[in-house]
Image: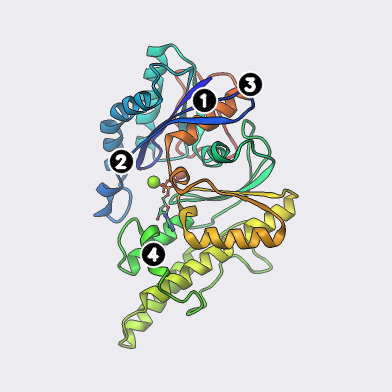
Amino acid sequence: MIVLGVESSCDETGVGIVRWNADHTTTLLADEVASSVDEHARYGGVVPEVASRAHLEAIVPTMRRALTAADITVPDAIAVTIGPGLAGALLVGVAAAKAYAAAWDVPLYAVNHLGGHVAVDTLEHGPMPACVALLVSGGHTHLLHVTDLGAPIVELGTTVDDAAGEAFDKVARLLGLGFPGGPALDAAARLGDPNAIRFPRGMTGPRDARNDFSFSGLKTAVARHVEKCRRDGIEPPVADIAASFQEAVADVLTMKAVRACVDVGVDTLVLGGGATANSRIRSMAQERCAAAGITLRVPKPRLCTDNGVMIATLGAHVIAGGAQPSELTVATDPGLSVQVSSY
Ligand code: ATP
Ligand code: MG
Ligand code: FE
């Protein structure tokens, strides 16, 4: 069975194609992504209208490139991100997926973007045992309990304010590092001392929700530190601030993720989302999982950011799990809960 996935929830137009094999593994056949990230850079963040327009321009060429790369004319099924995401951006991918499904007369499966971030790991690492997944991106921070990719996912916790990637982007802007800030901050941090400044670890007090996160206090602490440096007439030490901030984020994320594995009783942790490209989040997760006897699974960075392959892979699992196809009238759901894997 060959499944084509369409992704347009944020600023990436993605079309991916995978083959579902008899042994329940998936093989990547095409992975085409057009990003409008450069068009948002001058605004310092994703502008929904700009993203929608860019999706409109990119969707058909991206679809054609994917079909050519996979060397197929028609897939057996189409999976599409129905939410969560930007309303106008989602509409473009869903409208396109419906049109192709109708024209090709193939079934359409509307799936959850967040489940896709978890499912994509199976491409490289094979079938997934029950696990805890930590999703960290520009729009999301979730700790999830996944028992079966075709079935509903249980949310253990989420952020009460900013997403982790959003915090990276905001702190990078504060430090004059540009947008998207995550990669620039990661690079700056390599030259700094992660222990130079002890920034707060949000939501780690005894009375705080065990699996929830908060990053806005950390962001404010960085802003205060920068202001204080300027007041004292010294240039803020950008590398040390970046490294210390990154250390605080990685510390909280990995501590809570490993603890959740122990709480839930699973021995596998899966990372997903664009911010897991972060070198310190990866290395600290590696260290702490090794110490706790937990197997860490992290997709390669290209598959951690938004793409169509993750949607195709989740679609393949949903179909294999026996789900019925969606109606062609299925609506987008910008606020879709992570607990719903497909419609
Ligand atoms: P969504 O939240 O819907 O998944 P998104 O476009 O915000 O969409 P991704 O494309 O998955 O998310 O990831 C982009 C985010 O990841 C940005 O916030 C970016 O700063 C962050 N990011 C990317 N690389 C790194 C890095 N090396 N370190 C920290 N953050 C990073
Ligand atoms: Mg993105
Ligand atoms: Fe995403």
Task: Please say if the residues under marks 1 and 3 sit with CB atoms less than 8 Å apart.
Answer: no
Residue 322 badge: 3
Mark 1 → mark 3, Cα distance in angstroms: 17 Å
Mark 2 or mark 3, which has the lower sequence index?
A: 2
User: Mark 4 = which residue?
Assistant: 187
Mark 4 → mark 1, Cα distance in angstroms: 36 Å
Beta carbon of the mark 4 residue lies under 8 A of ligand 1? yes
Q: Is residue 271 left or right of residue 234?
A: right
Mark 2 → mark 3, Cα distance in angstroms: 34 Å
Beta carbon of the mark 3 residue lies under 8 A of ligand 3? no
Mark 4 or mark 1, which has the lower sequence index?
A: 1
Mark 2: which amino acid? Ala
Name which residue lies at 35% across and 79% down: 236
Numbered disc in front, either 2 or 3: 3
Task: Please say if the residues under marks 2 and 3 sit with CB atoms less than 8 Å apart.
Answer: no
Mark 1: which amino acid? Arg
Q: Quadrant of the C terminus?
A: top right
Q: Dividing the picture into quarters, in which one does residue 342 lie? A: top right
Assign a secondary structure to mark 3: loop
User: Mark 2 = which residue?
Assistant: 51
Numbered disc in front, either 1 or 3: 1
Q: Dividing the picture into quarters, in which one does residue 302 lie? A: top left
User: Mark 1 = which residue?
Assistant: 19
Numbered disc in front, either 2 or 4: 4
Numbered disc in front, either 1 or 2: 1
Numbered disc in front, either 3 or 4: 4
The residue carrying pointer 4 sits among few (fewer than 14), some (14 to 19) or many (20 or more) residues within 10 Å by Cα, namely some
